[in-house]
Image (cartoon, rainbow, N blue to C red):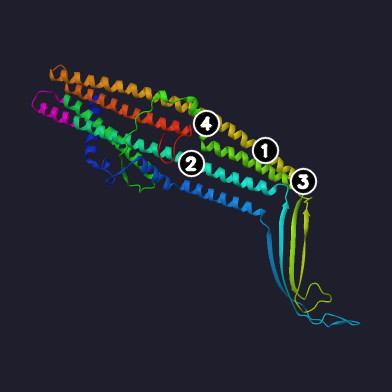
Amino acid sequence: MKHIPYFVAFLLTFHTLAVQTPAAQAPMTPMTPITIDDAVAMALSHSPALRAQSAAGDAAASREAVAATARIPRVSLTAGYYRIQEQEPLSLGSMVLGDRITDSLTASVEVVQPLYTGGAIRAGMDLAAANRRAAQEESEAMRRDLLLEVRRAYWSLMEATERVAAINDRLAQVQSATDDTRNRAAAGFVTHSDVLEVEMRLAQTELQLIRAGNGRRIAVARLALLTGSAPETDFVTTTPLPPPQDVALVDLAELTAGALENRSDLAALRVAVSAREGQTRAAASRRLPNLYATGTVTVARPAPETFPAENSFGATWRAGIMGRYEIGDQPGVGYAVAAARSDMQSALARLSAAEEAAIFEVHRGYLEWMTTGEEVRAAETLVSRGEEHLAETRTRVANGAALRTDELDAQAMVLEARLVLTSAEVARHVAWETLLRAAGEMRVAGEID
């Protein structure tokens, strides 16, 4: 008991400092109203990670287009100019060789059309298409994760704002009680100890308000970061919590089946397995020979078809089928095929692990959502009992059977009960949205079915 005066003195000192530093509770800027849909749209538009993933998807689409060009005939255009060293002509009877031709001009067109590549072109196109689909699924999964994160931040800000408002109301009540107790003490109706006791409650409430205000500022900063807003922006939420989902309408088995079918991250892993299959086929195609249809037309001076060479332009052409078999490449083909098959087995194992994790995530989310519903019902009972207790305490205070500090304690209990209820309601809705995301049901547009 001997330490109580020191503790009271500390609280009073803290109260004085808190009153002298209003900047701790001052708003950063005028509040900006924001709806949940606005927050989602701003975050989707701002997210650097989404832009990076979108660029990766564009690159994958371009690589798919590049792979398709392997079927197009390869047309090569070449031209050249050469200076031939002059020499004395050589006479062989009536034939003269080397009659001082000093310039050589050549132009040619070569066409190569793949006829058979052992499936390499088809495998390359399939691999590129699979990589493009995987990039799209990864982008979708990232968008849905961002959607959930933004909605969590929004509801956290709503909860923090309501907490600050409730504690402000509580502070006004305690301040009024403190002023009344001080007046009664000055009139000699209560002791100085009663004044100190109510001032302790005032300091405790101010401490709660400071902590709640800081929590709200953190929630605002988080939402501002996600939406790409200026750090000093002070948002105020305008979208109320949707009504709770009816438990009877939610089937765990359907949610689990939906997760395996609808989740974008699982779809991306399935596409990755398909891509590894294409990679295996592409590696195996190197074991087979390739056939090409070829043709070349050459125009040159000296005329290439005459002998001895004449100082005039002439044209030649050739056409045929060319086969190619890379003997020296075969030792590496086996290793490439083995590596591709191992990659495919690894992708299959990752898919299996991800599916198991998704099933567990849905079950855990379902249990958490059910638990938060029970917490809401318990908090509602807590608020009801607290309000009854406050009403009875006020009656006792009016009859002189209880002190004003007893009423303040009862008010504090009601305040805490209401804050617990608010937190439970927010937690229930966040748990529901988390469950929807686990089941692959969250919509990017911001709507939740």
Q: Magenta segment range?
A: 174-192
- The mark closer to the camera, 1 or 2, is 2
Q: Secondary structure at mark 3?
A: helix
Tell me the quarter of the picture where residue 433 sits. top left
- Is residue 434 left or right of 353 when viewed as pictured? left
Q: Earlier in the sequence, mark 4 or mark 3?
A: 3
- Is residue 280 left or right of 37 when viewed as pictured? right
Q: Earlier in the sequence, mark 1 or mark 3?
A: 3
Which residue is denoted by mark 4 in the rendering? 358
For residue 251, above or below residue 146: above
For badge 4, the amino acid type reads Ala
Which residue is denoted by mark 2 in the rendering? 142
For residue 428, above or below residue 318: above
Which residue is denoted by mark 3 in the rendering? 331
Q: Nearer the viewer, residue 178 or 75?
A: 75
Residue sitting at the far top: 401
x then y, percent, for residue 144 = 46, 39
Which residue is denoted by mark 1 in the rendering? 342
Q: Is residue 324 in view from this perspective?
A: yes
Residues tagged 2 and 4 counted as in contact (Cβ below 8 A): no
Residues tagged 4 and 3 counted as in contact (Cβ below 8 A): no
Taking the spot 49% from the left edge, 41% from the top edge, the residue there is: 140
Q: Earlier in the sequence, mark 2 or mark 4?
A: 2
**Considering the image in quadrants, where does the N terminus appear?**
top left
User: Mark 2 packing: few (<14 Cα in 10 Å), some, or many (20+)?
Assistant: some
